[in-house]
């Protein structure tokens, strides 16, 4: 996608350096962070400089490739430690583990140390490219669900910033907009980190897609008044039974959508589907710092970034980052292979190999 007319990807690797759009500074400042080694890239994932399941996956793949490039003739001890560090950054998105497993498997299949490094770099690049192609196809398939003038509600950011390019939930919106259908997007604010208000709104403004940010609590009201035609969200992990783990608050949208007869779609590439976990209840849910609930950061009237407290001093807070939506509340999964109802997901929606962990 373009930023001020220049084409960008969310994350890319140039030689041994990984570059990431700094999502912690958006929408107030556009900056690219450059990570010279795997530790810096892993830290960028941990700090959420890069976030969104497929983008995390690409960054993790590049980080492991960096580790192979940093290592000497026997890359394995260094790469093994790097893999553990990368896999310890964020626990929920399947894409991260899919990425490390895939890069590792490619390196292991190589005949010797130098070839292993080459194979790791090649696998990381291929993973990022395939992610882009997958999201493009999600957009093509999903656009058919978006009628002329449709009012789409989305949660969190599952746009191009959350992937290497195009997005998952927003890919159909962008494709429909390109077809001249003039969709309108209700953007859930998505407290506590406000990925909707900050990132999705910034993206949609950049692409010229009509939208409005709503407080998370306003979604059910808009649905009850007939002002939402469909919901599309992304996913961090889709379990074998079709349960969807995504940004906390997704479950509430799915319950409301069912109550008001509104279709609820989940868009995701194969790297997010996990045949190895039976259901949503079995997925590790990241618990983040209570400070994300207590504090908000933004510019004051002079443009200076300020961090302010928004909760009662002394009150504790709890901050689960994701929730699990049962498959029965999902109308359809928008995949690179097409749109499928729960129970009808083809085996091809899941990656062919779930490589062994080390
Ligand atoms: O904590 P985040 O910002 O990484 O969470 C992101 C989400 O929950 C997205 O909806 C999900 O990763 C899908 S991204 C295409």
Image (spheres, helix red, strand yellow):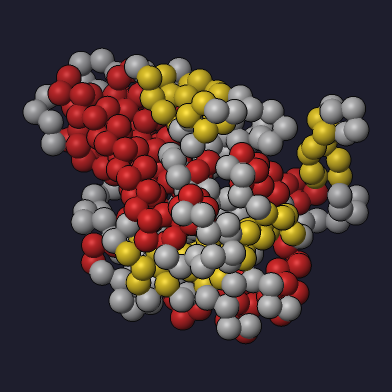
Hey, which residue is sitting farthest left in the picture? 111
**Residue 106 on image: x %, y %:** 19, 37
Left or right: 226 in relation to 236: right
Please determine whether, in this image, residue 156 is positioned above or below residue 339. above
Please determine whether, in this image, residue 55 is positioned above or below residue 140. above
**Residue 199 on image: x %, y %:** 63, 44
Q: How many marks?
A: 0
Residue 214: image quadrant is bottom right
**Residue 289 on image: x %, y %:** 68, 47
Q: Which one is nearer the viewer's eye here, 134 or 343?
A: 134
Left or right: 197 in relation to 200: right
Residue at position x 41%, y 54% from top? 139
In what quadrant of the picture does the C terminus appear? top left
Q: Does the rendering let one see residue 248?
A: no
**Residue 88 on image: x %, y %:** 46, 42
Residue at position x 24%, y 50% from top? 356
């Amino acid at each position: 996608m373009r930023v001020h007319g220049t084409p960008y990807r969310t994350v890319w690797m140039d030689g041994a350096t990984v570059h990431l759009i700094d999502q912690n500074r958006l929408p107030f400042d556009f900056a690219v962070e450059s990570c010279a080694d795997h530790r810096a890239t892993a830290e960028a994932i941990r700090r959420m400089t890069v976030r969104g399941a497929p983008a995390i996956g690409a960054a993790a793949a590049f980080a492991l490739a960096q580790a192979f490039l940093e290592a000497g003739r026997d890359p394995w001890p260094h790469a093994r430690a790097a893999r553990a560090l990368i896999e310890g950054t964020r626990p929920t998105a399947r894409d991260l583990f899919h990425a490390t497993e895939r890069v590792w498997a490619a390196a292991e299949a190589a005949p010797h140390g130098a070839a292993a490094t080459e194979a790791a770099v090649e696998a990381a690049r291929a993973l990022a490219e395939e992610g882009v192609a997958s999201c493009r196809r999600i957009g093509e398939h999903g656009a058919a669900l978006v009628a002329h003038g449709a009012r789409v509600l989305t949660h969190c950011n599952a746009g191009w910033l959350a992937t290497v390019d195009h997005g998952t939930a927003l890919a159909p919106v962008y494709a429909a907009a390109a077809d001249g259908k003039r969709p309108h997007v209700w953007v859930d604010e998505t407290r506590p980190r406000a990925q909707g208000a900050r990132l999705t709104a910034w993206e949609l403004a950049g692409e010229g897609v009509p939208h409005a940010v709503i407080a998370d609590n306003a979604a059910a009201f808009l649905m009850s008044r007939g002002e939402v035609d469909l919901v599309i969200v992304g996913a961090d992990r889709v379990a074998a039974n079709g349960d969807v783990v995504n940004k906390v608050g997704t479950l509430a949208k799915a319950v409301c959508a069912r109550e008001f007869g509104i279709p609820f779609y989940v868009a995701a590439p194969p790297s997010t589907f996990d045949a190895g976990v039976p259901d949503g209840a079995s997925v590790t849910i990241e618990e983040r710092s209570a400070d994300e609930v207590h504090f908000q950061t933004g510019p004051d009237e002079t443009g200076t970034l300020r961090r302010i407290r928004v909760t009662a001093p002394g009150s504790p807070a709890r901050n689960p980052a994701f929730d699990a939506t049962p498959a029965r509340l999902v109308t359809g999964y928008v995949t690179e292979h097409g749109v499928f109802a729960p129970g009808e997901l083809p085996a091809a929606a899941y990656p062919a190999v779930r490589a062994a962990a080390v």
